[in-house]
Amino acid sequence: SSMIYKDSKKTSKEIASELGVGNLLECSVQKNGDRIRIFAQLINSQTAQDVWAETYDREFKDVFNIQSDIAQQIAAALKVKIDPETKSRIEYIPTTNTSAYNLYLLARKKELEDGWKELLEKVIQTDSGFAPAYADLGFYWLLRGGYWGDLNAKQVLDSALPFLQKAVLLDSNLAAVHNYFAQVHLWYQWNFKGAEKEWNKFFQLNPSGTVWADNYQDFLEASGKFVEALNFSLKNFEQDKTQWEFLGRAASDYFYLDHPEK
């Protein structure tokens, strides 16, 4: 939901009202060579006053420590206690190689575009232990079967599984790779129990993982769990009313449940 408000002229109160939140985090990032400057402020949407603000002027290699520090300072400002599992996720550092991380950021920006696969390959050439890049390469090959549709199931699995297995070997707590394995189980093996196990692991590691909501909806609907799918869609739309696709999925579920009038 954040990107749709980039360069928005709306007030913090208007944005917060649309999103249904009490506070907003506003950030700006400037990178110059090996230096990075990040300004972050937490704004109370009702008063438009800062709850917390900080400027970080560091070397780019400190970017993960900065992210962790911002998250923990915001939690302290809001008087929220961070449990050990969440703290571990916040402090996760996928690589200490800044060149590999820069390449990975470029790859994420080019997702689904020409050159995406080649950038991910450069990432693992630069840092052979970068688990997210292996996971995303596995995802690329899954898309060759499901999104672009130019490979058959055997070709997809022969290409995707080695990357996904390597990602899990490097980091079994990488949430995204469990989503990708859930898709393998569902669409290529018709293994519903296997898919459900992977989804449970995914949401354990990433409780707010609505970015993959469509994939989970697919699993619920393919399993015939239309009530759960409907509730999942409505809950996600209630949390973020900018995401209209949740209403589209809810409409589908009402249809499956024989309530076409809704």
Image (cartoon, helix red, strand yellow):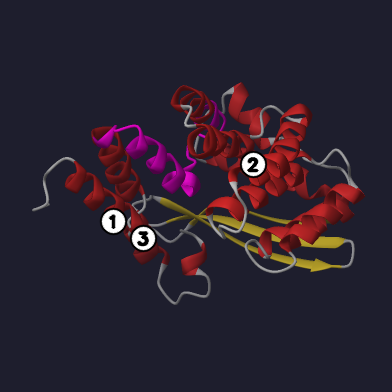
Query: Could you tell me how far apart the alpha carbons at marks 2 and 3 are, in whole angstroms?
Result: 38 Å
Q: Which mark is residue 248?
A: 1
Q: Nearer the viewer, mark 2 or mark 3?
A: 2
Residue 168 visible within the image: yes
Image position, residue 258 (x, y; %): 12, 43
Q: Amino acid at mark 1?
A: Gly
Q: Nearer the viewer, mark 2 or mark 1?
A: 2
Give the mark, 2 or 1, whose residue is nearer the N terminus: 2
Image position, residue 229 (x, y; %): 30, 38
The magenta span reads 201-226
Label 2's element? Answer: helix
Label 3's element? Answer: loop
Q: Amino acid at mark 3?
A: Thr
Question: Are circles 1 and 3 on residues that touch, CB within 8 Å?
Answer: no
> Front-most of 184 and 42?
184
Taking the magenta stretch, the answer to whether it contains residue 217 is: yes
Taking the magenta stretch, the answer to whether it contains residue 18 is: no
Q: Which mark is residue 242?
A: 3
> Front-most of 190 and 205?
190
Image position, residue 212 (x, y; %): 49, 46
> Is 122 on the left or on the right of 246, as rendered?
right
